[in-house]
Image: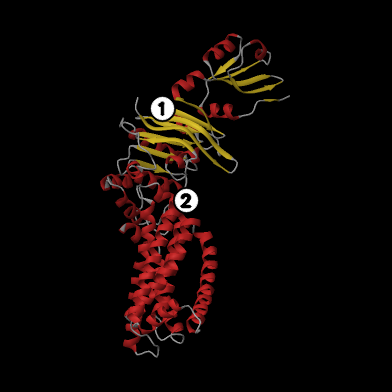
Amino acid sequence: MFNLIWKDILIQKKTLAYMGLYIILFGITFQNITADPFPAIAVAVTYQMIAAACSHEDKSGADILWNSMPVSREKLVLSKYLSMFVYTLLASLGYMAFAAVIHLTRLPIKASPITATGMMGSIVAIALMNSLYLPVYFRLGFMKARVASFFLFFALFFGVTFGVNVLSEEIHSAQGNTALRAIASALQSASDLQISLLLLGLAFVFLLASFCLSVKFYRNREF
Amino acid sequence: MENILEIRNLKKTFGDFTLDNISFSLPKGFITGFIGPNGSGKTTTIKLIMNLLKKDSGEIRIFGLDPVRQAKEIKNRIGFVYDESHFYEELTVEEMKRIIAPVYDQWDEQQFQSYAAKFDLPGNKKTKDLSRGMKVKFSLAIALSHHADLLIMDEPTAGLDPVVRSEILDILYVLMQDENKGVFFSTHITSDLDRIADYVVMIYNGKILFCTQKDALMENHAIIKGKASLLDTVRSSDLKGIRKSNYGFEAMSTAKETTEAFAKAGAVIDPPTLEDIMLYYTRKESSRV
């Protein structure tokens, strides 16, 4: 398993070199948008690295290579899911280095340190995004997945916005669903950490379901 | 004789192509050539053996095992060389080897280094910068460095110069001194098999035309040339790819008795090469004026 994850990093030597540049660029761009730019940077970098790894696999036709060797398809799928956490770690280290340089040089750029909530928020967002992307990739391959995932993320963004609006109306209306109102009230009284942990749990359930789906799709792939 | 690979009534359809209930087996200790024109089903068959495609029906047994249920065990004992390189372009030979080696239970680093030296493989060169010949040699070095019992090669010599082809064939010849191993060698360059194959399987339009010992094949087949009138007087049901012209006919005889009958009647008999056999089996009969 280690060699499969290491391989994903090795084939992206160029992307890794650019990663530092991305972090600086995103760090400067996002500082006017949010007080804590880390989650956005972590999500952008991680997604970029997952997509780049998949692109390299596609370009070389490596599926044929790995599936001709004594490596199970489950292991190949799992390595991509685990890589996601390695990239998150790399993005975190990269951001910490960026923040340290900003702090030491006293440049007029905001680079707040990574908080527990920020880290959990990042992991939740990364898990959700890749939970959607990876099954599509394992089902369709890189080229088709690129198009399909664009529409999927587009639908998700508007779907979530729409869903939040509907729920908000339901909760704030006097005739709204009592169960929803009770959940909303419980969430309002919960701390940020409690909410983050809840979201983290949900994200892992989502990730597990996504992994099972990816395995099912990849087992049925032909090369 | 023990078989290293057995295929029975294997069927696979996609689009307008069907691999049509093919059956053949590979005996242990021999090199089996798999011949047929492009598009006849060689790569499809190999992909089915390697479980890269899913069969519609039929049975495949490798070392007596099921390639789907016992995939890991089987693939640990198979070395493969494909017609295209599937290495990551940005990785060097050494990096590529390092990520592949842990996958095999019986990886033999000393063996790999010995082949790398023999093939002059440049460890620090990116795989994208290797020539086609070097890529094949690298694939072969990997295939031979984990004590594989079966070597599956899909058009490995296509596009290679005669010197590299000859080197690869020499290695296979040495490898086959071990009687427990087997080689399945798909190619449309049949001259390679003239040199090294013990058995020949021919596929055409998704059907197996024959699976036999090469020596017996060469013994039973002959190119016959003679007057067209001979076709009316001598039994010609065992002739393939008959071509008639104003000057006479030429065809491939597939039976010794037929060859002898034509010889007695005054026809010219020539020994065929494997390429001749493939051409006569696949060409359409015609009349030329």
Residue B88 visible to an observer of this rendering = no
Q: Is residue A41 or residue B10 the one in the foreground?
A: B10
Q: Quadrant of the N terminus of chain B?
A: top left
Residue occupying the point 34% across, 80% down: A117
Residue B202, position as x, y percentages in the image: 50, 30
Numbered-mark total = 2
Reply above or below: A49 against A75: below
Residue B69, position as x, y percentages in the image: 37, 42
Residue type at mark 1?
Asp
Q: Is residue B186 left or right of B204 when viewed as pictured?
A: left
Q: Residues within 10 Å of mark 1 (few under 14, many from 20)?
A: some
Q: Is residue A105 or residue B105 the one in the foreground?
A: B105
Q: Are marks 1 and 2 on the same chain?
A: no
Q: Residue furthest top?
A: B264
The residue that mark 1 highlights is: B198
Q: Say whether marks 1 and 2 touch (CB < 8 Å).
A: no
Q: Is residue A195 left or right of B244 when viewed as pictured?
A: left
Tag of residue A221: 2
Label 1, label 2: how many angstroms apart (C-alpha)?
35 Å
Chain of the residue under label 1:
B
Secondary structure of the residue carrying numbered label 1: loop
Residue A148, position as x, y percentages in the image: 54, 63
Q: Residues within 10 Å of mark 2 (few under 14, many from 20)?
A: some
Reply above or below: B41 against A67: above
Which quadrant holds residue B115? top left
Q: Quadrant of the C terminus of chain B?
A: top right
